[in-house]
Image (tube, rainbow, N blue to C red):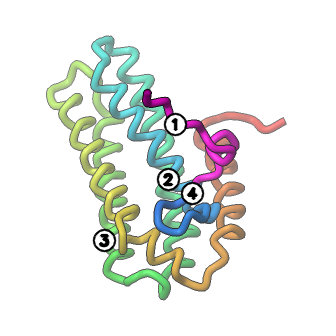
Amino acid sequence: MATAPQKSASSKTGARRTRRTNRRDPLAITLLKKDHREVEGWFDEYEQLEDDAEKVALFSKIALALKVHTSIEEEIFYPEERGEVEDDMLDEAYVEHAGAKKLIAEIEAMKPQDEYYDAKVKVLGEYIKHHVKEEEQPGGVFAQAKKGDEDLDAMGERMKARKQELMNELGGSVVN
């Protein structure tokens, strides 16, 4: 009789192991991937909503998370990975960020009952999904970064601190 696989100690503690090397991702990559999964889940949740107030509230969370995420990538990750990651991949990532920011601004200026509101949120989700694939695929930005000489754990600490600053600044939360 088949039994369910047992969870390993690493899955209980949240350490992420990669398939090929059985080594955990460095902190910088782990933080970015965690952001990706969070926003992907919110886009899926958005698809199920019908209430306009709930749509606005959830989109506000999505927009804040994307603004903070793009900031830490553009301020820390991408510049420090220039030279480690192919230039054209980083250039495309910056362009994708610019397109996402423009679409976020358009959606924020709208109301859920406006024409194309839901369609724009859907397209933004698809745009983000494409961007995430470019970063996470074999040979992508993250794979190239892991092969480089940068200390991605130390970079992750800087990214974590900057993310908290931005969340406090943009989200209005206060650290005690």
- Identify the residue under disc 1: 5
Please report the bounds of the magenta region as a residue range: 1-16
Task: Give coordinates of residue 97: x percent, y percent.
Answer: 36, 59
- Identify the residue under disc 3: 92
Residue 17: image tag: 4
Mark 3 vs mark 1: in front: 1
Residue 33: image tag: 2
Q: Are marks 1 and 2 in contact (CB under 8 Å)?
A: no
**Residue at the spot x=22%, y=30% of the render?**
117
Q: Is residue 109 above or below residue 49?
A: below
Label count reads 4
Mark 2 vs mark 3: in front: 2
Please rate how many residues cluster around mark 4, counting C-alpha atoms within 10 Å: few if below 14, some from 14 to 19, many from 20: some
Mark 2 and mark 4 lie on one chain; the one further toward the N terminus is: 4
Mark 4 vs mark 3: in front: 4
Q: Are marks 2 and 3 in contact (CB under 8 Å)?
A: no
Q: Quadrant of the N terminus?
A: top left
Residue closest to the eye, 90 or 114: 90
**Residue at the spot x=53%, y=69% of the render?**
21
Q: Determine the CA span between mark 2 and mark 3.
A: 18 Å
Task: Give coordinates of residue 168: x percent, y percent.
Answer: 67, 42
Q: Determine the CA span between mark 4 and mark 3.
A: 28 Å
Q: Determine the CA span between mark 1 and mark 2.
A: 24 Å
Q: Quadrant of the C terminus?
A: top right
Mark 4 and mark 3 lie on one chain; the one further toward the N terminus is: 4
Q: Amino acid at mark 1?
A: Pro
Please rate how many residues cluster around mark 1, counting C-alpha atoms within 10 Å: few if below 14, some from 14 to 19, many from 20: few
Instruction: Look at the numbered disc 4 and give the secondary structure of its residue.
Output: loop
Q: Amino acid at mark 4?
A: Arg
Mark 1 and mark 2 lie on one chain; the one further toward the N terminus is: 1
